[in-house]
Image (cartoon, rainbow, N blue to C red):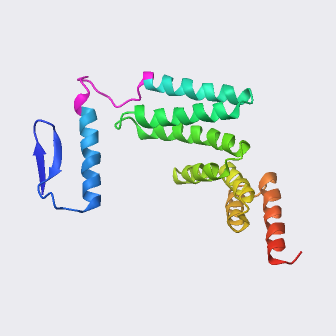
Amino acid sequence: MLRYDTNTKKLSLKDDADSNQDRINNLNQINRLTTALVAENNPNFQPQPSNETTNMIKNMFQAGMQQAQKKNLPDALKKVDLALQMRNKARKPWEPFAFQLQELQMMLRNRTDLELISQRNLDAWQDLEMLLSCGLIVPEVFLRLTDCLLKLNLVELAKPCCERGLSLDPSNAQLITLYKDCERRLLELDGDN
């Protein structure tokens, strides 16, 4: 059963011994959202992204991209990482998720490129998987993922990724080249070359 505290405006479980982790997580999320909404004092409240937060994140991200143009990759990655962290911490939980998702995808795509250039292939792989999980199913993501996996010498994983990219864009020359490279490497691994 649930208990409602009128002072804190939070829900809790009546039975503290309840160990259902899903129920506890759901209550924590409801309480977090409630706390953010209760603090909002605008009577005509409309859940829109905060311009101040958006500008702060955008400026940090643009500073990172400027560092990348100057070929200062470690600083560029640091600023893009900071922008992503700011995005996660500064955004209110009730802000429109569609806007946040587009912002996240754009930042992750750029960070992935910087990571691949900097040879941080495991970090790039993680970000590319996150992009796929966020629904960004486009040939460019599969191109980057195939390239990343080949750099990590994971040819068995790279070939299916390349095939998925080719299924979306069969005439993509870069994906075709990577696919041929995957096949050549697999033949070498099998000892057929």
Q: In this orientation, does residue 17 appear?
A: yes
Depicted 130 relative to depicted 100: above or below: below
Q: Would you say 25 lies left or right of 17 here?
A: right
- Closer to the camera in the image, 48 or 142: 142
**Residue 21 percent coordinates (x, y):** 28, 60
Q: Residue sitting at 24 percent across and 36 percent down? A: 35
| Horizontal relation, residue 79 to residue 169: left or right | left
Residue at 22% from the left image edge and 32% from the top image edge: 38
Is 95 a magenta residue? no
Figure check: 3 above or below 46: below
Q: Quadrant of residue 149?
A: bottom right
Q: How many labels sit on residues? A: 0
Q: Quadrant of the N terminus?
A: bottom left
Q: Residue furthest right?
A: 193
Query: Which residue is at 28% across, 34% downward?
Result: 36
- Residue at 38 percent across and 29 percent down: it is 48
Q: Which residues are magenta?
A: 38-52
Using the image, determine if residue 182 lies above or below residue 114. Answer: below
Image position, residue 84 (x, y; %): 52, 36
Q: In the rendered image, is residue 172 in sight?
A: no
Q: Residue furthest front?
A: 74
Q: Going by the image, does 123 lie left or right of 73? A: left
Res 111 → quadrant: top right
**Main secondary structure found in the magenta portion:** loop
Residue 41 is covered by the magenta coloring: yes
In this rendered view, identify the residue nearer to me: 20 or 44.
20
The image quadrant where one finds the C terminus is bottom right
Residue 79 x/y as whole percent: 58, 31
Q: Is residue 76 left or right of residue 18?
A: right
* Residue 148, image x, y percentages: 70, 54
